[in-house]
Image (cartoon, coloured by chain):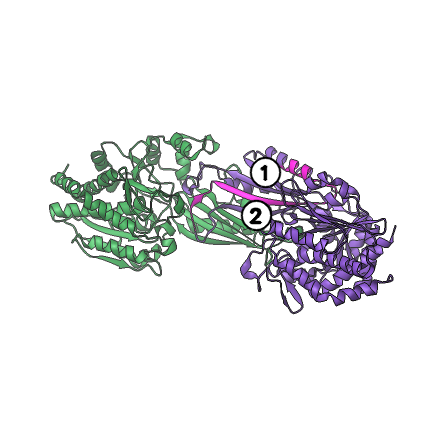
Chain colours: A purple, B green
Amino acid sequence: MAEGMQAIFDYIDAHREEFIERLRTLCKQPSVAAQSLGMQETAEMVVSSINALGLGHADLLPTGGGFPVVYARLEGNGPRILNFYNHYDVQPAEPLDLWQSDPWGAEIRDGKLYARGVADNKGNTIARICALEAMKAVRGSLPCTVQFFVEGEEEIGSVHLHHFVEEYAHLIPADGCIWEFGGKDASERLTMSLGLRGICYVEMRCTGANTDLHSSVANGVVNPAWRLVWALATIKAPDGHVLIPGFYDEVLPPPPEAVIALEEMPNNEQAFLRRVGLTHYLDNLTGVPLRVRDRFQPSCTISGFLSGYTGPGSKTVLPSQAMCKVDMRLAPGMTPEKTYERLCRHLKDHGFDDIEVELLGPEMPSMSPIDSEIVKAVVETANEVYGQEPVIDPISPGSGPSYLLCDKFSIPMAGAGVGYSQSNAHAPNENIRIEDYIQGIKHIALILDRFGAGA
Amino acid sequence: MAEGMQAIFDYIDAHREEFIERLRTLCKQPSVAAQSLGMQETAEMVVSSINALGLGHADLLPTGGGFPVVYARLEGNGPRILNFYNHYDVQPAEPLDLWQSDPWGAEIRDGKLYARGVADNKGNTIARICALEAMKAVRGSLPCTVQFFVEGEEEIGSVHLHHFVEEYAHLIPADGCIWEFGGKDASERLTMSLGLRGICYVEMRCTGANTDLHSSVANGVVNPAWRLVWALATIKAPDGHVLIPGFYDEVLPPPPEAVIALEEMPNNEQAFLRRVGLTHYLDNLTGVPLRVRDRFQPSCTISGFLSGYTGPGSKTVLPSQAMCKVDMRLAPGMTPEKTYERLCRHLKDHGFDDIEVELLGPEMPSMSPIDSEIVKAVVETANEVYGQEPVIDPISPGSGPSYLLCDKFSIPMAGAGVGYSQSNAHAPNENIRIEDYIQGIKHIALILDRFGAGA
């Protein structure tokens, strides 16, 4: 370990309670973008925390109508620039009755901190700030320049981030980016992602009569629920194959090094299946083929469907409206624009002109090289901090704006974070373990040291 | 007109305000079976109103766990027995914000009485009681025996009525039955139905994981919304044809006299289409073929569908549950039991063992002969009271328990009632016109006189 790192780790241990309190303070501040709850206050708290470092000035940069991005450039000694991508917005806390403590209470129980957003993404945001504080306190300066991009709309699809990226393109270039998340898997190994699938999320709507009607007239009057069902059935076959012409055309095969990484991933399948109450994956897939399909193949998911009467018992109604949400994850090579166009054309070709398709929150797939300097720095230092080899996930099955902030500027990225397999991100009783948080602060400090030392 | 009828009509005119108040009193008493709201109170009010006639005793007869049936037998002079079928339960008043006055306020505006249930079915119930009062007052007795069967569960599918019919089968036989409803169409002609389609209403449910999951795992985890969509698409084709094997096997062709009646029905199609904001019926059907399809063909309607996230914007969720309601109207010849069995077998044969199908409120189709004594009495007297030929609808496209109370006992039936084309039954601002109500009372009195005179 580089000279002085032990002093930095000691500083982190000595300020442990302060660092926990700092995170609790941010967690007690609600910041739900979907509900416009506490967004400005939270952004300003993040700005203050960065400014308190005394390493440079943080700003709130506008995003063309959306919640602002917290941006800071903290000059370092070395020539490299390292970007941190985080977000200060969190998921809604609902359903509240399933929480064992106030989602905005930041209660600590059994060594865990419970709060909405503590795993996704406030824990990681504050851990990074604390790591910089420790480095400044011990060494007086940073080994490389660090930039923060902490956005406020990640949980609603980063809807305005492309405006920001266009407007402030000159600020973004860097030598590497630490992506927002990462954490320990069921076998306690740190997992880091080097990319994300894209997404094309649409809402489909159909309207029949101008009012719900008695279902006795159903033989003569169009039923929008049937229209959507028939349309959906032309989109994906019961065997899982998507039937939209050209849907798979641009899907790239997984690079050989990605397949090797997938082969080296631990098998946590049984633990997952047990947890969610299932006996097998679709098509009885398992191992590497399952991992490949989850990452290098697109998906097409009905995320919601609503029409007519859905209360208890029978109501003999012919609905006037039907709506469904379809979530298409995009594998590397695909684009949300082409996918959306193909879906619309397919519906038209099948006579579904009466179905309106609204595109919500498109995101490009992204994939970082596995042999970049930032990946090397994260992997090596993870070994040192956690005492075992991290798991490299070449691309997360989820989605996020990493194309916009990384691929678009050829900035290689890697994830790092303080979550674990039961963090319940997006779910009730979201939590992180205090020890993971402290280790995570040390990991970030060590990454900075190692990456900053390079040229 | 028979001797004394003018005196009866005069009595009705003289007691007009009293008869309106009697109806308002019943309408002010909520009686929503689906919400168990005021059911016992309402049943007792109906019992009191019948007992007040001084013609016989009304009872509340149990239905094996459901709301009781108001039963009364009022002995008359002649040998014939005439049954009245009505119901004291009404639809829920919701959505309340679309009402222009309190649904339980029974407000009179512009010659109309507004109240939930006034058209369906309290107006008809009280009109029949008032007609008997007038007859008793003028003549001292009834020309034939009259029985009331006023149930409390019509709006929830008459779920316990078959218990009642088994237990009290000895009470039911009669020479004719006046069914619960009837009213004036858009051209102000009285429409009377001589039967009803049956119904097989099911709720289909499918479960995947034990909790909603992040949709990034969708390529490996079963999606109950897709399962239901695929299952539904095997049930009915986009051309409207139901694909369940044997579904249409027992459908009877319309009897020639029914076709003649359908040919004689006025064409109100354009008025209906304009009102509901549509330009045409499915398959551009019109006239007699449309009327035949609405009555002598079954239907298969998605009445509701719910799964996953249905709020604004995007939520990337893989639902753990999906539910839909399917309303199948049964043409004469079909039975709900066979239809249900065929649906279940069809789903099994297509590999949908994971879909649970619950049968809710089955009802048999029913069809009364067009040349019965009761139909003759209703038609002739309608001519006299309303001054024009009534419209005979050989079978209503809707459903109800007429098989149980009529066909099963070979009792011919005909509808008669005080509704009109804008009564808004089941909808906000339900209303009847006061003049229709008064005319309806006279019509019932005249039917009784005419039918009772026969042997």
Residue B377 percent across, percent down from the top left: 22, 39
Q: Which residues are magenta?
A: A314-343
Relative to the observer, which residue lies in front, A430 or A29? Answer: A29
Q: Chain of mark 2?
A: A
Residue placed furthest toward the bottom: A110
State if disc 2 and disc 1 touch (CB < 8 Å): no
Whether residue B55 appears in this view of the structure is: yes
Could you say which disc has been placed on residue A304 in the image? Answer: 2
Relative to the observer, which residue lies in front, A306 or B220? Answer: A306
Disc 1: which residue: A357
Residue plotted at (61% across, 49% down)? A33
Residue B343 percent across, percent down from the top left: 50, 49
Secondary structure type for disc 2: strand
Q: Which three-letter amino acid code belongs to the residue tagged 2?
A: Gly
Residue A324 in magenta stretch = yes
Asked if residue A395 lies left or right of residue B59, the reply is right
Of the numbered discs 1 and 2, the one sitting upstream in the chain is 2
Relative to the observer, which residue lies in front, A67 or B115? Answer: A67
Q: Tell me the crowding category of disc 2: few under 14, some 14 to 19, or many 20 or more residues within 10 angstroms, Cα based.
A: many
Relative to the observer, which residue lies in front, B37 or B227? Answer: B37
Residue B142 percent across, percent down from the top left: 15, 48
Secondary structure type for disc 1: strand
Residue B342 percent across, percent down from the top left: 49, 49
Residue A120 in magenta stretch = no
Asked if residue A416 lies left or right of residue B290, the reply is right
Which quadrant of the structure image shows residue B210?
A: bottom right
Whether residue B71 appears in this view of the structure is: no
